[in-house]
Amino acid sequence: MTHLVVDYRQQAETLLQLGREFHARGWVPATSSNFSARVDAGRVAITVSGRHKARLTTDDIMLVDLDGNSLSPGKRPSAETLLHTALYRRHPEVGGVLHTHSPAATVLSLTVGDTLMLQGYELLKAFAGVATHETRIRIPIFANDQDITRLSAQVDAWITEHGALHAYLIAGHGLYTWARDLRHAGIQIEALEFMFECELLLRRIGS
Ligand SMILES: [Zn+2]
């Protein structure tokens, strides 16, 4: 038990650090976005609903079970918690899930249809199992939906049909990505945001 508490504190500290870093990059405006880390097989540390990500304290992190129920008395998780816990339930190896709202992700998600294909980028190697830029990563774009249970079911069905997935976009809303731990999930956010900005630049040059 002591081990788990220490682990929780470490995870919480990393979540605070990511909040400051991502806010400085313009990826988590206002009180948007949420970050989470697996604490053990059945519990996840996640940012409390509606908190400003640049100013998080450990009081802004709470525990939920894998159905998204609060395990921290008096603290309410974001409705989008279910999108996090669905990934932890489906993938026992996932240790961190990050959700951001950058301008590049938002604009692309509203303009490229139902899929964004990333190909030819050296930074694709930031993803687990990708050893060369000579590949492509498919990012599905789901319609935004305030019914998070329904949206979560759509994501789950997509993974069942198409297999491995590294990230997805919600139209007009933002990005979700996940990895074996928070550090790798953070690297994926950084790589994806770089490629999203490149995609915007390419479209500007092409127009
Ligand atoms: Zn969101």
Image (tube, rainbow, N blue to C red):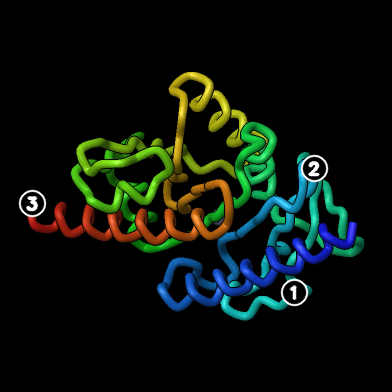
Are there few (<14), some (14-19), or many (20+) residues within 10 Å of tag 2? some
Residue tagged 1: 58
Measured from the top left, where is residue 59 in percent x and y? 78, 74
From the viewer's perspective, is 143 left or right of 126? Answer: right
Q: Quadrant of residue 148?
A: top right
Q: Tell me if residue 68 comes above or below residue 106 in the rendering.
A: above
Residue tagged 3: 206
Residue kind at label 2, given as amino acid type: Gly
Residue kind at label 1, given as amino acid type: Thr
Q: Quadrant of ligand 1?
A: bottom right
Q: CA distance from mark 2 to mark 3?
A: 48 Å
Report if the CB atoms under discs 2 and 1 are less than 8 Å apart: no
Q: Tell me if residue 73 comes above or below residue 150 in the rendering.
A: below
Q: CA distance from mark 3 to mark 1?
A: 46 Å
Please report whichever mark, 2 or 3, sits nearer to the chain's N-terminal start. Answer: 2
Residue drawn at x 49%, y 60% is 186
Q: Tell me if residue 151 comes above or below residue 39 in the rendering.
A: above
Report if the CB atoms under discs 2 and 3 are less than 8 Å apart: no
From the viewer's perspective, is 152 left or right of 115? Answer: right
From the viewer's perspective, is 190 left or right of 59? Answer: left
Please report whichever mark, 3 or 1, sits nearer to the chain's N-terminal start. Answer: 1
For the N terminus, the quadrant is bottom right
Residue drawn at x 63%, y 48% is 95
Q: Nearer the viewer, residue 150 or 61?
A: 61
Residue kind at label 3, given as amino acid type: Gly
Measured from the top left, where is residue 155 in percent x and y? 54, 32
Dot label at residue 42: 2
